[in-house]
Amino acid sequence: MSPEKLSPLTMTTMTTTFDLDRQLGVKSYSFRHIKENVDVAAAVNLCGATVVDLSGCHVDYDDPGQQERAIAVYRDAGVRISGIGVVGLKNDAAFNRRFFEFARKAGCDVVSCSFEPDKHEEILRGLEALCHTNGMRAAIHNHGGRHWLGNATALDYVFRRTGPAVGLCLDTAWSLQAGEDPFSWLEKFGNRLYGLHLKDFVFDPKGRFSDTIVGEGALDLPGFLKAFKSLPFTGSAVVEYEGDDAVDATGRCVEAIRRGWAATD
């Protein structure tokens, strides 16, 4: 069913048929060092995936021609665009509308986003309007302890002031970095979970962190996947790896997650 025919309210009541083995994708930001979309699509396929969540480093929101070419590249490579972001919203309807227009063109219904606290009430009202107008969902991304939306208290504040069109894009590693518990977030925000960035960090004694293969760091991957499987999820779930040798490491993350997913049966 196309996103323009499915309202956000309907989507939040669906029972999931989400298969992480088949629908797991890759965040294109992992391949930000790769500039051409045709090469990004090839890297996604090399990782064993056929789904991508596009970042701003691979799409020009002010160039419709570039957008059409990018969409065609992924379509021709057999790679589905499951979402876009993380986009930085402003208290500017025209500025924010560009993201939703591209998402519609790309055939996806999840826009992951972030914004600063100034004018956040106005931004949220505008965001809800864009979601309902376009039949899409917005997923707020948690950027760790450095950002005001990186903790459960702030996210709960936002979700209590918005309807079900606005939910969460959970980045597991940033949740851990903020001293939060991703498991408790699944329990607390599971019905508002529209995006998932499966990422893992290792921490040194001083709290410094670096990317690692998902499941080999602080994230209890088997436990997380078991909890995730019970959720009514219909969004965009992707691997994100920001370290070196990203293509090889992302492929290993995909394999680890699929093994973990199979073990939950």
Image: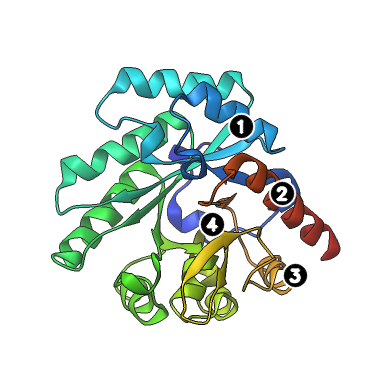
Q: In this view, does 230 lie to the left or right of 114?
A: right
Which amino acid does the dot numbered 2 rest on? Answer: Arg
Picture coordinates of residue 45, whole percent (x, y): 67, 31
- Please say whether residue 26 is visible from this viewpoint: yes
| Mark 3 secondary-structure assignment | helix
Q: Dot 2, how many residues are within 10 Å of its Cα: few (below 14), some (14-19), or many (20+)?
A: some
In the rendered structure, which disc, 2 or 4, sits on the residue that comes first in sequence?
A: 4
The answer to which of 88 and 209 lies nearer the viewer is: 209
Which mark identifies residue 25? none
Which mark identifies residue 252? 2
Which-is-in-front pick, marks 2 and 4? 2
Q: Are marks 1 and 4 in contact (CB under 8 Å)?
A: no
In the rendered structure, which disc, 2 or 3, sits on the residue that comes first in sequence?
A: 3
Picture coordinates of residue 205, whole percent (x, y): 52, 82
In the picture of the structure, the residue carrying the numbered disc 1 is 43
13, above or below 86, in the image = below
* CA distance for labels 3 and 1: 26 Å
Q: Dot 3, how many residues are within 10 Å of its Cα: few (below 14), some (14-19), or many (20+)?
A: some
In the picture of the structure, the residue carrying the numbered disc 4 is 197
- Please say whether residue 13 is visible from this viewpoint: no
Quadrant of the frame with the C terminus: bottom right
Picture coordinates of residue 241, whole percent (x, y): 55, 51
In the rendered structure, which disc, 1 or 2, sits on the residue that comes first in sequence?
A: 1
In the rendered structure, which disc, 3 or 4, sits on the residue that comes first in sequence?
A: 4
In the rendered structure, which disc, 3 or 1, sits on the residue that comes first in sequence?
A: 1
In the picture of the structure, the residue carrying the numbered disc 3 is 222
| Mark 1 secondary-structure assignment | helix
The answer to which of 40 and 264 lies nearer the viewer is: 40
Q: Dot 4, how many residues are within 10 Å of its Cα: few (below 14), some (14-19), or many (20+)?
A: many
